[in-house]
Image (cartoon, rainbow, N blue to C red):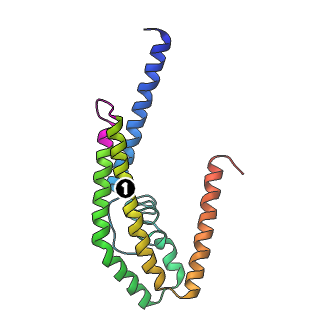
Amino acid sequence: MTTTVKRIALGVGASLVALGVTAGVYARAQDQNTNQDPRPFRGRGMGPGGPGGRGGPMGPGGPGGPMGMLPMFGPRLGLTDEQKDQVKSIVESHKGEWKAIADRVRTAHEALEDAVTADAVDEGLVRQRSAEAGAVEADMAVARARAFAEFVQILTADQKAQLQTMRAEMKKRMKGRRQAGRGIR
C-alpha cells in the first residue's frame, strides 16, 4: 500500500473510533438520565449529581427534565401553595407518560449505538435508527410542550410576564456563553 492510502485508511479508522466513542458516551449519558424525579422543583435545576446529573438541567427531555426550565424558574415565580399543588398534580398526571417516553428514548439510542458500532457499516440502518431516535425525541418534546402549556395556565398574568422575562434572560446568557466558547465577543 502506498503512503497516501495508509494515511487515508488511518484517518478513516481514527474517525470511526472517535465516532464510536462519542456515540457510546452519548448513549451512556442517555441511559443514566432516565430518572424521572416527580418533584417539579429541585432547587436551581440541580438534580442528584449536580448539573447534568440524573435529573439535572440537562436530564431527560432537555434542560430541567420533563418540566423544562421550571426547576430553575419555579421557585422564583412566587407560586402560591395552591399553585404548587397544581404543579404537583400536573407532574403526577404525566409521570407514566414521561417514564414510557424515557424508556423509548433509551431503547432508540441503544439501537442507534448498536448500528453505529456494528462490525460492518450499514448506512441505511444507521439512518433508520437515527430517524427512530429523532422521532422519539420529538415525542418527548411534544409531551414537554403539553405539560408546559398546562403549567402556564395556572400562572397569574404577572407570573407569566415574569416567566417570559426570565426565559429571555436565560436565552441571552446561553447565547453569550456559546459565543464566548467560540471566542466571539
Question: In x, y percent, where is residue 48?
Answer: 38, 64
Which of the 4 image quadrants contains residue 136? bottom left
Which of the 4 image quadrants contains residue 149? bottom left
Is residue 6 visible in the rendered structure shown here? yes
The answer to which of 79 and 106 lies nearer the viewer is: 106
Question: In x, y percent, where is residue 156?
Answer: 53, 88
Q: How would you rate the neighbour count of disc 1 (Cα within 10 Å): few for under 14, some for 14-19, many for 20 or more?
A: some
Quarter of the N terminus within the rendering: top left
Q: Is residue 80 left or right of residue 137?
A: right
Where 4 sits versus 149, above or below?
Answer: above
Identify the residue shown where x is 32% and y is 36%: 117
Question: In x, y percent, where is residue 110?
Answer: 29, 47
Q: In the rendered image, which residue does mark 1 sit on?
A: 135
Q: Please, what is the three-letter code of the amino acid marked with disc 1?
A: Ala
In the displayed orientation, state which residue is furthest to the right: 185
Is residue 55 visible in the rendered structure shown here? no
Q: Is residue 159 left or right of residue 118?
A: right
Residue range (magenta): 113-122
